[in-house]
Amino acid sequence: MNNDEIRGMSNEKEDSYELSIGQLAGLTGFDVHRLRMWERRYGMPRSRRLPSGHRRYRTEEVSRLKLVRMALDMKLRPAQVVPASTDTLERLLSGLYSKQSTIPGFNDTGFLVETLAGYIARYDADSFMQRLYGELSVRGPFRTVYDLVGPFVTRIGDGWSSGELSIGHEHFATNLLNDFLGTVWQRLNERCEGRVCVLATLPGERHVLGLQMCAVVTALAGRQVIYLGADLPVRETIRIANNLRPQALCLSLSPAMPKPEITETLKRLRRDLDSGIGMITGGRGAIDGLTGIERIVEFEQYMQRLTTTA
Ligand code: B12
């Protein structure tokens, strides 16, 4: 089944039970027979029946069942985990993972990303923010952005493409992340006395999460962030940058924008920016090989670039 078909099916019935058993099986990797068997045996995953007799599941079941899979992989018994609520599964898994966190190379990102996705599926903003701030206090800003927020954004994008999450979920998640990342870099920025970096996107670009992540790393590198956000006219970006004379103009580019348009606009920016101002681009829409414009893929490299050059 392709993405359009999946989306079409979930739009057939606009209520909170959005997934058919086939969709749920496809999205969680548990086969249809097992899902039916578990419902008979444990009453979960709970479904609602349409007049035709077909089952419909809440979209939250996907992240709950992904946690069930993680718990089964950790050798817990189906009777213990299949009927458990998402909260119970999170507590169980947090306990198990924290015991293992001392093992070198151990990584619990998958569990955390799934937990965050579960909060989004349930529109639970409080738990989502609490969890992110909790991780921030343990991991610090760089690792939270790099290890957690990046993979989480990808998870939300994939959830939307597969029909698991609605566009409303995606907007809900994006707005919460915007608040979180904005608060993090603004706090760091208060203490920055280093050179300025101007952060912007190109006209027409509405994706700003990459830019917000970039702002956190910029402030961590001790640079003062001047955040211009999305969709500013090029003329204005040039005027501000030439006035402020930053170390660099840093641009976040998504793949949604047409490449020829990006290339033209970047060339124009480079031509009209003072030559002493660096130009750094990042994000999946960034383009290699343009004279005087650096493309940086990883935030580690970006941090290094800002801190090792004046
Ligand atoms: C959230 C989102 C939206 C939101 C954005 C809200 C907001 N305020 O930001 C909304 C709903 C508005 C949206 C709209 C659209 N979107 Co959208 N969106 C996404 C989503 C889920 C996340 C995008 C994001 O923020 N990524 C930012 C970061 C996390 O990712 P990244 O670019 O890979 O960057 C990494 C690094 O490179 C680095 N980085 C980023 N910037 C910088 C900068 C510097 C200097 C450095 C050093 C590093 C760096 O940070 C990241 C770390 O992992 C993606 C799916 C995805 N998996 O990315 C689709 C996605 C980008 N969107 C897509 C599309 C098609 C669109 C629309 C055209 C849809 C439509 N038909 O309207 C519009 C276009 C709007 C526009 N004109 O810009 C496609 C693009 C595909 C393509 N190749 O064309 C994607 C990939 C989804 C998909 N799989 O189809 N979108």
Image: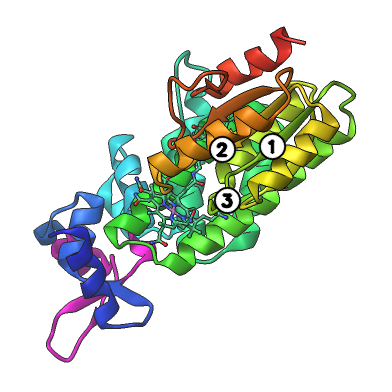
Mark 1 Cα shell of 10 Å, populated few (<14), some (14-19), many (≥20): many
Proximity of marks 1 and 2: CB atoms separated by less than 8 Å: yes
Compared across the picture, whether 125 is left or right of 96 comes to: right
Residue sitting at x 19%, y 76% = 55
Mark 3 Cα shell of 10 Å, populated few (<14), some (14-19), many (≥20): some
Q: Label 2: which residue? A: 252
Q: Is residue 84 above or below residue 12?
A: above
Residue 171 percent location from the top left of the image: 52, 62
Query: On the rendered image, what quadrant is the N terminus found in?
Result: bottom left
Q: CA distance from mark 3 to mark 1?
A: 13 Å
Task: Name the residue type under label 3.
Answer: Pro
Does 54 lie within the magenta span?
yes
Q: Label 1: which residue? A: 199
Q: Is mark 1 within 8 Å of ligand 1?
A: yes
Image quarter of residue 27: bottom left
Does residue 23 appear in the picture of this structure? yes
Residue lying at the far top in this picture: please name it.
Answer: 308
Residue 199 percent location from the top left of the image: 69, 37
Q: Is residue 68 above or below residue 186?
A: below
Task: Name the residue type under label 2.
Answer: Ser
Residue 168 percent location from the top left of the image: 47, 69
**Residue situated in front as seen by the camera: 11 or 125:** 11
Residue numbers of the magenta segment? 35-62
Residue sitting at x 48%, y 22% = 290
